Amino acid sequence: MHNTQADGMAGTDEPSGVDQVFLSLERELAVFLRRARATSGELARAVHPELESAAYGLLVRLADAGRQRATDLAGYFGVGKATMSRQLRALEDLGLIAREPDPADGRAVLVRLTDEGHDRFSCVRNSRRAQYARQLASWDRREVAELARLLHRLNGEQDAEEGCGTPGKGERAGKGDGGGDGGNTGSAAND
């Protein structure tokens, strides 16, 4: 267990004038993000042993939002087209996604999960949600809902602050599955 004094009480080695509430928030978020990054690789490998952790978030987005253009995915995650193309090519090589013509624009291509990609991803997601349920079994369901609500609010305010006018970027469904995480397409915190 970590000790970050999340109750906002002053530590003995902190400089005076530091807002202890925000210091505690910073510490708790750092622990959460460290664990999320570590878990991201485990989740990716559970979907496919050769899957890069950075690509896991793409599977989350495609599972939640359905078929997407690569340019829309790049905008959603805040990465360049070349980065998105490389990650999509890797997912396609693993048989997890497929490209198909966009019926609305014959020049464009849509990316979707393959049946195998959907099945593998769903299996990992269901296992992960069961793990959440076990970890939070001692919490009242209202507390879990409140945590989800506050995270949704935090994510929405960060999107607004970053000026995320890109369609889809601010679409956090409140399910804990939003895909934005500072540009990294594969954060375990997103599933």
Image: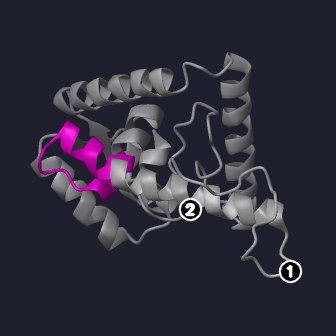
| Disc 1 element | loop
Q: Give the residue type that dot 1 points to.
A: Ser
Q: For this rendering, which residue is in front, 155 or 35?
A: 35
- The answer to whether residue 165 shows anywhere in this view is yes
What's the magenta region?
A: 40-58
Name the residue at 54% across, 43% down.
Answer: 178
Crowdedness near tag 1: few (<14), some (14–19) or many (≥20) residues, C-alpha within 10 Å: few
Residue 118, placed above or below residue 108:
above
Tell me where residue 20 appears, x and y as whole percent.
81, 65
Crowdedness near tag 2: few (<14), some (14–19) or many (≥20) residues, C-alpha within 10 Å: few
Q: Is residue 65 left or right of residue 103?
A: right
Name the residue at 19% across, 50% down.
Answer: 51
Q: For this rendering, which residue is in front, 146 or 12?
A: 12
- 102 is within the stretch colored magenta: no
Q: Give the residue type that dot 2 points to.
A: Ala
Q: Which marked residue is nearer to the observer: mark 1 or mark 2?
A: 1
Q: Would you name the residue on which mark 1 appears?
A: 16
Which label belongs to residue 30?
2
Which label belongs to residue 50?
none
Q: Whole-Å distance between the Cαs marked 1 and 2?
A: 22 Å
Q: Quadrant of residue 53?
A: bottom left
Asked whether the beta carbons under mark 1 and mark 2 sit within 8 Å of each other, the answer is no
